[in-house]
Image (cartoon, rainbow, N blue to C red):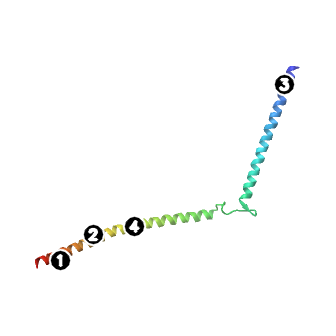
Amino acid sequence: MLRNNTQGKLVNFMVRRKNRLNNLVFKEVNSIKEKARFLQQKTSINGSPRSSYSFSGRNKRKAQGLVEYALLVGLLATVALLAITHLGEAINQGFLQNIRANLEAASVTVTSS
């Protein structure tokens, strides 16, 4: 009799434990569903999704085009800067050598007179 009573208590304990776990899981699932509904309502206006939250293919292509344009502008600016630097040094050296040669020629004519 004692053994049957202990088994009955154990079975009752297990059933209560299972019911508590089922209730906790049920509450958690309901909580998750409520959170999902809240987020869905938060991200929609009048039943239609907000454009700031939707990344359609058109927006991706537009962004990709802007990135390509920015890279192209940066590359062209770098090439232009290098070309101006190189040509500036070449022009500067040629111009200074021409002035130096003219000054030397002028000083020779002044000293020889």
- The quarter of the image holding the N terminus is top right
Q: Nearer the viewer, mark 3 or mark 2?
A: 2
Residue under the point 40% across and 67% down: 81
Among the two numbered marks 4 and 1 on one chain, the one whose residue lies closer to the N terminus:
4
Residue labelled with disc 1: 106
Q: Is residue 7 above or below residue 95?
A: above
Q: Position of residue 54 (x, y in %)?
A: 66, 60
C-alpha gap between disc 4 and disc 1: 37 Å
Left or right, 47 with respect to 108, comes to right
C-alpha gap between disc 2 and disc 4: 18 Å
C-alpha gap between disc 3 and disc 4: 89 Å
Residue labelled with disc 2: 93
Q: Is residue 29 above or below residue 12?
A: below
Among the two numbered marks 3 and 4 on one chain, the one whose residue lies closer to the N terminus:
3
Amino acid type, residue under disc 4 in the picture? Leu
Q: Position of residue 10 (x, y in %)?
A: 82, 27
Among the two numbered marks 1 and 3 on one chain, the one whose residue lies closer to the N terminus:
3
Q: Position of residue 38 (x, y in %)?
A: 74, 54
Q: Nearer the viewer, mark 4 or mark 1?
A: 1
Amino acid type, residue under disc 1 in the picture? Ala
Q: In terms of secondary structure, where does tag 2 sit?
A: helix
Amino acid type, residue under disc 3 in the picture? Gln
Residue labelled with disc 4: 81
Amino acid type, residue under disc 2 in the picture? Gln
Query: In which image quadrant can residue 28 be found?
Result: top right
Q: Which mark is residue 7?
A: 3
